Image (tube, grey):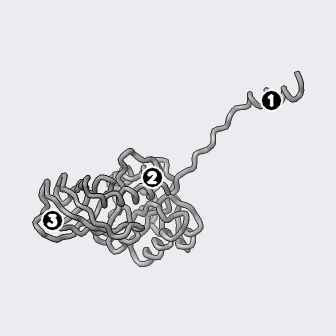
Amino acid sequence: MTMAMDRALRTLASPIVPRKKAVAKIALVDLHDSTRSTLSECFRQFGIETVIMDGDVADRLQREKYEACVLNLKAGAEAIMESARTSRSNSRMIIYGLGGSAQDAMRYSKYGINAVFHEPLERQSALKLVRATHTLVLHEFRRYVRIPVITEISIVSSDSRRFTATSQEISSGGMSMQTEDEVGMGQNVEISFALLTLPRIWVRGTVSWRKGKNFGIRFDLADERRARVKEWIEAYLEN
């Protein structure tokens, strides 16, 4: 056996070392120790690594890559979200707010907050939110993905009533949202909204379900404007 052949056989016999899968990281920004501990435990259950972040957070989000972040919705939050959304690495990161309500999060709607952990933080409710959104953090998408996002929706009903709602999730086929106003099953509506890089769009739809203050709208298949929503979702997921 030649030396060259011997080396070749030894190479073939060597075990193949699998490439280590990149770990999804989420930044915990300026949170109390108890909150950090609870959220770290929740995200760890889904294989997501948490990184405690203090100091010059805005600068770090310009330089370091994270799949998501959790930050307090208080003074200084806007600068951090601005830094994330204008960075090359984190412009499409999942942003969780902490504290307040969905209405409080509306102040930052132009930054596309995806979901809110309410205070005082309870482990079960936090785990429920993480379970509902972790596939986006891990980039493990279902065929018909629903993206959680909080923004204001303007609605005109078929009887010419005008009111607003707060979005919860959006897909290429429709949206779920919340409102204090009366909305009837099967009612035709036209809604308008803006999402990060998607300028304000108008699209027709029908109320497909209602539960308490929450309801869902199925986009009108004949409305060609819904294609812009589908394009935005695809671009969001490709990042």
Q: Which mark is residue 192?
A: none
Q: Would residue 102 be visible to someone looking at this image?
A: no
Front-lying residue, 126 or 235: 235
Mark 1 or mark 3: whose residue is earlier in sequence = 1
- What is the three-letter code of the residue carrying label 3? Ser
Whole-angstrom CA distance, mark 3 to mark 2, is 40 Å
Q: Secondary structure at mark 3?
A: strand
Residue drawn where x is 26% and y is 58% of the image: 223
Q: Where on the picture, by quarter, is residue 19?
A: top right
Could you tell me if the residues under marks 1 and 3 are in contact, i.e. CB atoms within 8 Å? no
Please give the residue where the numbered disc 1 appears in the rendered image. Answer: 8
Task: Please provide percent x and percent y for residue 3.
Answer: 89, 28
Task: Please provide percent x and percent y for residue 95.
Answer: 42, 63
- What is the three-letter code of the residue carrying label 2? Phe
Residue furthest to the left: 159
Task: Please provide percent x and percent y for residue 173.
Answer: 30, 52
Residue drawn where x is 37% and y is 50% of the image: 145
Whole-angstrom CA distance, mark 1 to mark 2, is 45 Å
- What is the three-letter code of the residue carrying label 1? Ala
Q: Would residue 110 be visible to someone looking at this image?
A: yes
Please give the residue where the numbered disc 2 appears in the rendered image. Answer: 43
Residue drawn where x is 86% and y is 29% of the image: 4
Mark 3 or mark 2: whose residue is earlier in sequence = 2
Would you say 168 lies left or right of 206 here? right
Task: Please provide percent x and percent y for residue 208.
Answer: 19, 52
Mark 1 or mark 2: whose residue is earlier in sequence = 1
Q: Which mark is residue 157?
A: 3
Above or below, 72 relative to 16: below
Residue drawn where x is 40% and y is 57% of the image: 231
